[in-house]
Amino acid sequence: MDAKSAWEGTFNEVKRHISGNEETIKLMFIAMVADGHVLLEGVPGVAKTTMSRTLAEAVSADFKRIQGMPDLEIKDIIGHTYLDDANTLQLKKGPIFTNMLLVDELNRVLPKTTTSLLEALEERQVTIGNATLKLDRPFITLATQNPLNIEGTTSLPKVLADRFLMRLGVTYPNLEEEIGMIEIKERPEQPVRKVLKIEDVLAMQRDVQSIVMPDDAKKYIVDLVRATREDIHVVMGGSPRADISFMRCSKAKALIEGRKSISVDDVKFLAKPVLSHRIVVRATGGIGVNGVIDGITATL
């Protein structure tokens, strides 16, 4: 199965269980093909968790979920060692050992605990005691976070947020989508069909490397990221990791759309998902992150 057919089949299956959120579903699939992690931000009840679980089931991925709470400990994520009855040291692996990990409400977790994710997100490995263990491939983290004005939430450290390939805002559905959601829930619950095998996902991740990146697209990516560092409304602009994220996401988008090379339009489509969690805007600027990104893309 080619990547375009794989995407279309997966999308059609996910849409049997989700109303609306077409662009979000596509961006989640792009991130998976690009071998990257996703932050899903939105108020409770807008299907962030359902989308994550449904996508994982459709691609036959092993799936585990962690509920973010202030009392969550590092061992609850990566695991721990213990002495058994025979006084032998044993290892109990945590839920991070999976293909797709969902961390619900990540911004309710204390920073001292979220540091346990840094090694896993970047290097696809964890260290427990003296042992360094490789994670299964693919390993994709889908983390949800509530808006910061909801009780009990804190801002994610930038060093952690930057490890995520994309940040996707999940909003309330429109009228038709909300009616569609009721109709889906009214029907008897149906199992998610497994459209892909995990080997298909790994094959697409390899095929991304064959996508051509023209010089004009390369220059546009660099110009866009550098412009975030020079904008008067921005305190901290995008790092070179943003350049790499644009490259990976643009190639994955072209692959699932059946194209052999990327375009500047691919980069523009990905601007907010790739940049919105990587730049810091002045509180007194009177303009939000998305406004800054819109202004930059409009002038380049």
Image (cartoon, helix red, strand yellow):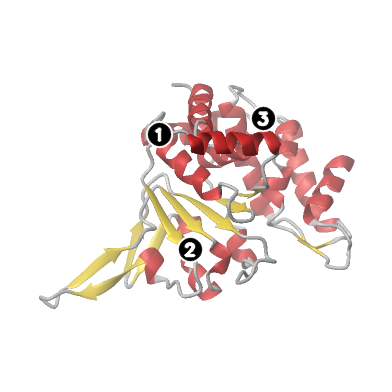
Residue at mark 3 to residue at mark 2: CA–CA distance:
31 Å
Name which residue lies at 12% across and 76% down. Answer: 85
Among numbered discs 3 and 2, the one appearing first in the sequence: 2
Residue 187 seen by the camera: yes
Residue at mark 3 to residue at mark 1: CA–CA distance:
37 Å
In front: label 3 or label 2: 2
Residue at mark 1 to residue at mark 2: CA–CA distance:
33 Å
Direction from residue 10 to residue 240 in the image, left or right: right
Residue 190 numbered tag? 1
Local packing at callout 3 (Cα closer than 10 Å; few below 14, some 14-19, many 20+) is: many
Among numbered discs 1 and 2, the one appearing first in the sequence: 2
Name which residue lies at 56% across and 68% down. Answer: 108
Name which residue lies at 44% across and 52% down. Answer: 101
Closer to us: 240 or 104: 104
Among numbered discs 3 and 1, the one appearing first in the sequence: 1
Q: Position of residue 111 (x, y in %)?
A: 55, 73
In front: label 3 or label 1: 1
Q: Position of residue 225 (x, y in %)?
A: 76, 49
Q: Position of residue 230 (x, y in %)?
A: 85, 57
Residue 200 higher or lower than 233, as above or below: above
Residue 117 numbered tag? 2
Residue 146 higher or lower than 296, as above or below: below
Contact, CB < 8 Å: mark 1 with mark 2? Answer: no
- Residue marked by disc 3: 262
Amino acid, disc 1: Gln
Q: Position of residue 5 (x, y in %)?
A: 50, 22
Amino acid, disc 3: Ile
Tag 1, which secondary structure?
loop
Residue 20 seen by the camera: no
Contact, CB < 8 Å: mark 3 with mark 1? Answer: no
Q: Point out the residue furthest to the left here.
A: 86
